[in-house]
Each structure stands twice: as C-alpha cells, then as structure tokens.
Amino acid sequence: MEGVKLTGALGAEEQKQVLPPEARTARGPVAVIECVQQIPCNPCEKACPFGAIEIGPDITQLPRLDLEKCRGCGICLSKCPGLAIFLVDASQSETEALVMMPYEYLPLPAVGDNVDGVDRTGRFVTKARTVKVDTGAQRQGTAIVTLAVPKEFMHEVRSFRIPAPDEVFLCRCCEVSETEVRQAVREGARTVAAVKTRTRAGMGLCQGRTCRRLISRVIAEETGQSPADILPPTSRPPVRTISLAALAGGEDDE
C-alpha cells in the first residue's frame, strides 16, 4: 500500500486492484470502490440494494464489488464515510465519460459550469463540465456531482475545483490578476521570477511573501508540473520591509 502510505492517495498498483475493466465501463455506470485500508466499516455493504458489495462478518475486511451485480445506482456513494466510492460511465459518448463523486464543500457548482478536474492528490488533470448535482434528502448532506471528462481521464479525475473569478488578484500589492499570471505562463514564463518580470507580481511591499506560492501553483497547473518543482524566486535582502532610516543605521527597526 505504498501509495496510500506515502501520499494518502492510491498508487498505480493499488488502482489496478479496484478499477473496472474497459468492457464494463463501456456498458454503463459502475461503482469504483477506492478503499484499500482495513478499518472497521461496512455501510456500503448494507446500502447496496443489489448485494453487489460484500464485506462479510469481519467488518475490517476490504469491500469486494461484484461487477455483474452492480447497477450503477450510486446509493453507496453518499453512504461511504470516507468518500471513497465513485461511479464511472463510458457508455454515453465516444469522447467523454461521466464521473460521479461525493462532494461535501460549498459552494456547489451549477449544471453546465466548467470546473477544474483534479486527481486523488488535488493536482489539476483536465477541464470538466458539470452535468448533474444531486442534493436529495436521501444523500444526507453529501452531494453527488457528475462531471463529464475526456475518456482518457475518467480514472484520474476524483474531485474538482471551481475556478476563481478572473478579477481575483494573486498579487494584491501590485493588483496583478490570476488571468494576467496565466497569460504570462502561456506566453513562456516558467518561473516565479519570469512571471514577476512580465507582470510585476511580487514587486510590491510584501516582496512576494504572499503571492509567490499562489503563482507557483498557477505555473504548475498550466504546465502540468508539481508546485514543488517550480523554481522559487531569489530572496534578496532586506527579507522584510524596513525603513530607510534603519538601512542608513539611524534607528533600530526591531
């Protein structure tokens, strides 16, 4: 279970144990139970009206899904306390698949909204379209959101982010918007320093202490990298805002 132990998310080998075959997803919706840790839990087994999920008398055993019995009803999604069950359906389109996922944050997207599909670690994967938002009473506070994603990403997208409005400033000191930063990256900026050169982001009073992490995240999303791989800006003294008098040695700026 190296993936879960290292990152808290399923690794490649763990995914092989739970992902349904292509032939099954092509027939219609089917559950994907991404529970790989043995803990005392069995609500999914009790919730399934078709007996497709089996755990047994020892409730620390991993759930086993009978792909032929599963009807893709989705009842189990909101019953799992760990939000570890999803539905995938590759039968609706030649190019898109539907991914249904539990979601317990606000605000909820509206049908038709475009969102950022992210993977099990929160990393951006692809743009997705909101197809359905189910908040019925039977869901008991856990909304079920259905996204349409490119078929090649249906086993990667497991959550989403609602994009921030374009007018949001990443650098508040110099009023540089997220749109401006993304445009700079699309024009070739690949480091925080390069974005700073093009947009002045990070040149304000805080000298990037607030915005540099946000800029790194945008660069990572636009280029498909990890934020940890983005080259940080060079720190130059003074490392905090001080007065000219302090620089001249005329006063103590503690």
Image (spheres, grey):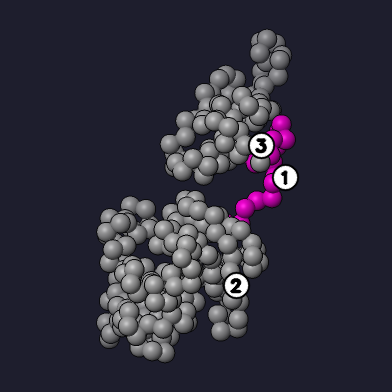
Residue furthest to the front: 94
Residue 168 versus residue 229 in the image, above or below? below
* Image location of residue 165, percent across then percent down: 69, 50
Residue at (35, 88) in percent of width and height: 51
Location of residue 188 (image quadrant) = top right
Residue 244 versus residue 117 in the image, above or below? above
| Mark seen at residue 167 | 1
Residue 251 falls left or right of residue 20? right
Residue at (37, 53) in percent of width and height: 7
* Image location of residue 149, percent across then percent down: 50, 61
Can residue 76 be seen here? The reply is no
Residue at (33, 52) in percent of width and height: 6
Give the residue pinned by disc 2: 133
Q: Of the residues shown, which amino acid type is indicated by label 3?
A: Glu
Mark 3 vs 1, N-terminal side: 1
Q: Of the residues shown, which amino acid type is indicated by label 1?
A: Glu
In terms of depth relative to the viewer, which is nearer, 208 or 215? 215
Give the residue pinned by disc 3: 180
Q: What stretch is highlighted in magenta?
A: 161-178
Q: How far apart are marks 1 and 2 (CA)?
A: 26 Å
Quadrant where the N terminus is found in the figure: bottom left
At numbered mark 2, what does the secondary structure look like: helix, strand or loop? strand
Q: Distance between the residues labelled 3 and 1?
A: 10 Å
* Image location of residue 98, percent across then percent down: 49, 68
